[in-house]
Amino acid sequence: MTAQRRRPKHDPKESEREILNAAEKFLSERPFRELNVDEVMKLTGLKRPAFYVHFRDKYDLALCVVQDIGQELFTLANHWLKGNNFPEDSLQALEGIVNVYQKHGAVLRALSDAAVADERVEQIYRNLIQDFITATARHICEEQESGRIRKDMNVEETARALVWLEERYLSEAFGRTTQADPKIVVQVLHNIWLSTLYGTY
């Protein structure tokens, strides 16, 4: 009779998610410079070697955390980026993005602050922001072609200014212990985007 295989104690996907959640919890409370494998694994039910099954080092872990949150943000931003009714689509997108920052703002702020002193973290974080700048610039071009945005607008620099403005504002609004009123934040950002791109609010 063939012996029954023992089932693994942890599903690999569940283990990876547990480590990512632990890293987010750590970064929501402490700076990136204090992040290390031992501290993260203390927040999980896993042994230290399990970390290296999924991640090379803490920078690889940080990259995965950023990509994870970035995917959430992009899914919501696509309400506007792939829509054709800016006032309504952008409002829905901003409401979703603000909700993500309410949940993950402290983590994103920790990574943003770390980027000032650490080149590897800076590259990870700036790549996320650049993806949004590129997508925004592409959509502005599409709106120019449709006649909804004036042709003399500098597309790349306008996209860069709007995305970095939003990133800094959201980081200040939701990256600290005391958070801003999300409804006010949404309205302020909506007015800025609408007036800048379409000349109205």
Image (spheres, rainbow, N blue to C red):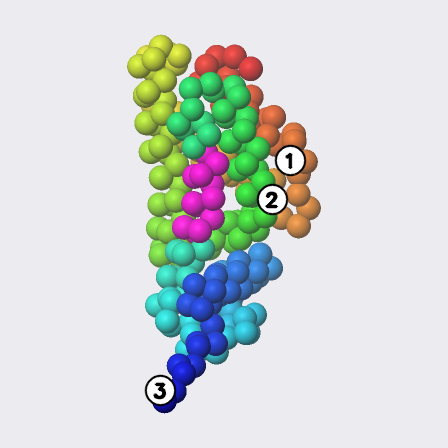
Asked if the residues shown at circle 1 and circle 2 are in contact, with their CB atoms under 8 angstroms apart, the answer is yes
What secondary structure prevails in the magenta region? Answer: helix
Quarter the N terminus occupies = bottom left
Q: How far apart are marks 3 and 2 (CA)?
A: 53 Å
Up the image or down, 31 lies above or below 171; here it is below
Residue 128 appears in the picture as rendered: yes
Quarter the C terminus occupies = top right
Residue 55, quarter of the rendered image: bottom left
Up the image or down, 18 lies above or below 128; here it is below
Q: Is residue 130 rendered magenta in the image?
A: no
* Count of number-bearing discs: 3
Q: Residue furthest bottom?
A: 1
From the image, tell me which residue sits under label 3: 2
163 displayed left or right of 137: right
Judging depth in this view, the residue of 168 and 66 nearest the camera is 66
Q: Residue at x 57, y 60 (%)?
A: 25
Q: Which residue is drawn at 43% across and 63% down?
A: 13
Q: Residue type at mark 3?
A: Thr
176 displayed left or right of 13: right
133 displayed left or right of 186: left
User: Which range of residues does the magenta coloring cover?
Assistant: 66-77
Q: Is residue 71 rendered magenta in the image?
A: yes
Q: Which residue is drawn at 35% across and 50% down?
A: 123
Q: Which mark is drawn over residue 102?
A: 2
Between discs 1 and 2, the one toward the N terminus: 2
Q: Which residue is drawn at 42% across and 19% down?
A: 84
From the image, tell me which residue sits under label 1: 182
Between discs 3 and 2, the one toward the N terminus: 3
